[in-house]
């Protein structure tokens, strides 16, 4: 096995409105080591988010690594404004599921596969 | 600075969400310099601003405010309520004022109260457009004269300045219309000379009360203490504590950029902020800075009416129908357009098949053995929406499709009556920054001498 499920590395994976026109996804990691590896190897890209959410990359406003919380924040433009006709999630609280299926290749972890495996134990 | 420290008691995440009396009492015993509470959010959507009603119940708000106002008056601690009634427009502020007056009357309380309104006239917004003082916060939302005219109600988020002015007027209770969430917690401290960066950051965390603690709760009290070069957070319930991660994680909650948080008159810069755990389940935060902007801007929130809604809720269990449901919906839409003399927006929300995520759903072809369907119609009048929804429901119930063996009816209707009239529908159409010359003048302050 050379892929780690994101759900094993993260303590929180959530989505929420950031105002009525944006959706913000937060991924908070258990440990600084793995957070830093993921940040340094640039795992979270607009291309990745574009692919798993099926949206053009220009709908992704920004991807920011927030060191104090060992967290990655991804902000998207909402397809429909909160509460507008056709919206299906007024608070934006159930749009995180595509992140749950992500797996992280061990070679994305700094220092190579062995160290990545060790971090899991 | 008259005092070296400033303690702020935050009873609950949203006024009306509740809090344990023991936690609140523990907070009062620590002699706070201020009790502040946020009542607002745009999260519940555009309806509440448009309809002028609160998303919290009167009974719940009265319970929370009863404890807060009685304690504030008894101890002479100032009390500031932000974004009254959830959306902070005039009907919401007046509704909350009515509750405060009931509490005063029932408990024999007298105090001086400031009421600060945050409604912005359409003419004010149009003038700002004409003078190029408006910037959209979403690329999807250019401001036009047409959209301004369609607005039902517009509010602006006030900054600390109107609240400071009300404090100067000797008010013990300050009831604010829509305000920037941290303002009720930060305004008195900024006025006293504490660093605005620390005061706003502490306010940003306190406005959600114990949501920022661990385990989190929207219904419990916390205390923030502001010092010259840092602030400290503590839970007031022994079941909870602040941790470095809970505090940092909350700092990024509901914001698009965790390092730079724009607000009225400037930006809160957290790029140098540090979070450190200290004894007693407390966290010490330092390094947060506030950078005043060249232009003073306030955020506008406005909604327009887009019609009236009727829905019908039903389930589908027949596998043959489930396989061809998309085609059935298309046929019904086409048929109704051609035969029914009524216009309206028709939507089918299918739970069990992309009902939650819509276009963002990656598993578009996954099929459940049963589906929940909400038939939704939005039309110009309620009667029209009711009529169109009833027509679609009956068509769907008896529609024929290839391979149909269940000829008695296609839907498991959830209720009798099967259709629900939902009332007026609103959408946000103003979400802009407006620059102003004076941070106070758009927010009129009225003084009330409240007596039993």
Image: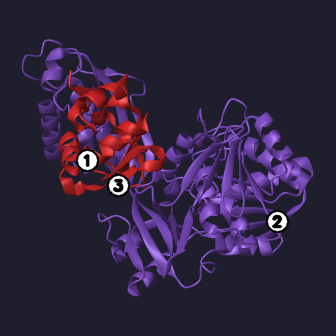
Q: Position of residue B336 (x, y in %)?
A: 18, 41
Direction from residue B11 to residue B413 in the image, left or right: left
Q: Residue B110: name its quadrant.
A: bottom right
| Quadrant location of the C terminus of chain B in the rendered image | bottom right
Q: Residue at x 20, y 31 (%)?
A: B363
Please say if A115 is above or below B259: above
Q: Nearer the viewer, mark 2 or mark 1?
A: 1
Q: Secondary structure at mark 2?
A: loop
Q: Position of residue B68 (x, y in %)?
A: 79, 48
Q: Considering depth in this image, is B72 or B4 the residue closer to the camera?
A: B4
Give the residue furthest to the top: B405
The CA distance from mark 1 to mark 3 is: 50 Å
Q: Considering depth in this image, is B230 or B297 the residue closer to the camera?
A: B230
| Residue to which mark 3 is pinned | B380
| Residue to which mark 1 is pinned | A42
| Quadrant location of the N terminus of chain B in the rendered image | bottom right
The CA distance from mark 2 to mark 3 is: 59 Å
| Residue to which mark 2 is pinned | B3
Q: Chain of mark 2?
A: B
Q: Residue at x 22, y 14 (%)?
A: B408
In the rendered image, residues at marks 1 and 3 fall on the same chain: no
Q: Colour of chain A?
A: red
Q: Which chain is the one coloured purple?
A: B
């Amino acid at each position: 096995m050379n892929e780690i499920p994101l759900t094993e590395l993260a303590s929180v994976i959530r989505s929420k409105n950031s105002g009525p026109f944006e959706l913000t996804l937060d991924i908070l990691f258990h440990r600084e080591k793995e957070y830093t590896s993921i940040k340094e190897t640039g795992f979270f890209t607009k291309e990745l988010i574009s692919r798993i959410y099926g949206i053009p990359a220009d709908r992704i406003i920004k991807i920011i690594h927030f060191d104090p919380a060992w967290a990655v924040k991804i902000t998207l433009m909402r397809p429909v404004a909160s509460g507008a006709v056709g919206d299906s999630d007024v608070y934006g609280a159930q749009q995180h599921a595509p992140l749950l299926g992500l797996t992280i290749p061990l070679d994305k972890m700094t220092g190579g596969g062995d160290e990545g495996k060790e971090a899991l134990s | 600075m008259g005092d070296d420290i400033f303690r702020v008691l935050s009873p609950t995440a949203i006024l009306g969400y509740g809090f344990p009396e023991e936690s609140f009492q523990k907070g009062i015993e620590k002699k706070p310099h201020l009790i502040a509470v946020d009542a607002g959010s745009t999260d519940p959507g555009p309806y509440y601003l448009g309809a002028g009603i609160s998303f919290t119940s009167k009974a719940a708000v009265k319970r929370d405010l009863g404890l807060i106002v009685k304690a504030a008056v008894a101890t002479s601690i100032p009390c500031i309520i932000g974004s009254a009634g959830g959306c902070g427009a005039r009907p919401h502020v007046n509704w909350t004022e009515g509750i405060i007056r009931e509490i005063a009357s029932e408990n024999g309380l007298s105090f001086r109260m400031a009421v600060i309104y945050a409604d912005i006239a359409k003419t004010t917004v149009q003038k700002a457009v004409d003078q190029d003082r408006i910037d959209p916060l979403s690329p999807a939302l250019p401001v036009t004269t047409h959209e301004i005219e369609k607005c039902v109600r517009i509010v602006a988020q006030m900054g600390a300045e109107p609240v400071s002015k009300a404090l100067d007027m000797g008010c013990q209770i300050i009831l604010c219309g829509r305000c920037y969430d941290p303002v009720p917690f930060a305004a008195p401290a900024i006025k006293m000379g504490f660093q605005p960066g620390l005061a706003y950051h502490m306010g940003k965390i306190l406005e959600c009360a114990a949501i920022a603690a661990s385990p989190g709760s929207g219904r419990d009290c916390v205390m923030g203490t502001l010092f010259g070069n840092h602030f400290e957070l503590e839970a007031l319930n022994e079941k909870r504590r602040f941790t470095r991660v809970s505090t940092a994680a909350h700092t990024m909650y509901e914001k698009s950029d965790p390092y730079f948080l724009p607000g009225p008159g400037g930006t809160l810069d957290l790029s140098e902020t540090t979070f450190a755990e200290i004894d007693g389940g407390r966290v010490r935060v330092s390094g947060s800075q506030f950078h005043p902007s060249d232009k003073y801007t306030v955020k506008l929130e406005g909604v327009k009416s887009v019609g009236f809604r009727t829905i019908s809720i039903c389930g589908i269990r027949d596998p043959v129908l489930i396989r061809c449901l998309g085609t059935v919906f298309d046929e019904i839409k086409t048929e109704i357009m051609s035969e029914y003399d009524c216009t309206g927006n028709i939507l089918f929300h299918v739970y069990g098949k992309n009902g939650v995520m819509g276009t963002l759903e990656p598993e578009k072809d996954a099929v459940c053995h049963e589906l929940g369907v909400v038939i939704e119609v939005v039309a110009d009048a309620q009667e029209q929406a009711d009529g169109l929804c009833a027509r679609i429901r009956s068509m769907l119930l008896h529609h024929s499709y290839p391979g149909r063996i269940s000829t008695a009816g296609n839907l498991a209707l959830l209720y009798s009556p099967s259709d629900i009239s939902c009332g007026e529908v609103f959408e946000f159409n103003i979400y802009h920054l407006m620059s102003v010359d004076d941070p106070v003048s758009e927010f009129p302050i009225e003084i009330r001498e409240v007596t039993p």
